[in-house]
């Protein structure tokens, strides 16, 4: 692929990196005159004459290195438009879930869950939500939660 894109005035250097490479892979690739990087610096090697080939890279990796990848004139990667569509759909879902969470907590007051050594603070991130008392003169006061007696 690189040789078909290469021209005398535009040489293409092949630089590869994959955390799954084992020493045998690296030896073989180097024997084909390919530069193999390790330690996560492969993206720093991208220039205006780099072909970036990421057909199976996770989205997180591609997006994390968007600045470096955008320097490349040619990119082979998963369908970015499909990713954008997926993210937009996810954003709509997130917005809906935020509204639902706000619906649940609106007109409610919350207090921290009581902690004790017996509970080993297992409920530290829990809150008790109760409806604000309508007949209470103090706004924002929470009704005591009803605890069943055995």
Image (cartoon, helix red, strand yellow):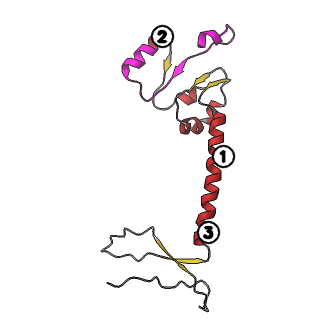
Disc nearest the viewer among 1 and 2? 1
| 46 relative to 114, above or below | above
Residue 65: x percent and y percent?
59, 36
Would you say 148 lies left or right of 10 here? left
- Residue 105 in view of the camera: yes
What residue would you read off at disc 3? 103
Q: 95 or 148: which is nearer to us?
A: 148
Query: According to the image, label 1 marks what residue?
Result: 88
User: Can you tell which quarter of the image residue 118 is in?
Assistant: bottom left
Q: Give the number of marks.
A: 3
Task: Report the Cα–Cα distance between label 1 and label 2.
Answer: 42 Å
Say which element carries label 2: loop
Q: Residue furthest left?
A: 118
Q: Is 8 inside the magenta-drawn segment?
A: yes
Q: Residues within 10 Å of mark 2 (few under 14, many from 20)?
A: few
- Distance in Å between CA atoms under marks 1 and 3: 23 Å
- Looking at the image, is 100 positioned above or below residue 79? below
Left or right: 95 in relation to 21: right
The structure residue drawn at horizontal position 67% and vertical position 13%, both measured from the top left corner, is 10
The residues colored magenta run 1-29
Q: Nearer the viewer, residue 9 or 114?
A: 114
Between the residue at mark 2 and the residue at mark 3, the CA separation in whole angstroms equals 61 Å
Q: Which mark is on residue 32?
A: 2
Q: Nearer the viewer, mark 2 or mark 3?
A: 3
């Amino acid at each position: 692929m690189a040789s078909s894109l290469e021209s005398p005035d535009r040489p293409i250097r092949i630089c590869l990196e994959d955390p799954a490479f084992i020493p045998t892979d690296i030896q073989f690739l180097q024997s084909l005159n390919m530069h193999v990087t390790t330690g996560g610096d492969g993206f720093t090697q991208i220039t205006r004459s780099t072909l970036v080939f990421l057909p199976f890279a996770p989205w997180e990796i591609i997006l994390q290195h968007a600045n470096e990848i955008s320097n490349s004139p040619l990119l082979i990667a998963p369908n970015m438009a499909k990713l954008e569509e997926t993210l937009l759909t996810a954003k709509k879902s997130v917005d809906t879930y935020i509204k639902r969470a706000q619906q649940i907590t609106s007109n409610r007051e919350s207090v921290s869950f009581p902690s004790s050594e017996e509970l080993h603070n297992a409920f530290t991130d829990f809150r008790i939500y109760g409806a604000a008392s309508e007949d209470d003169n103090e706004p924002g006061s929470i009704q005591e939660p009803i605890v069943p007696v055995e």
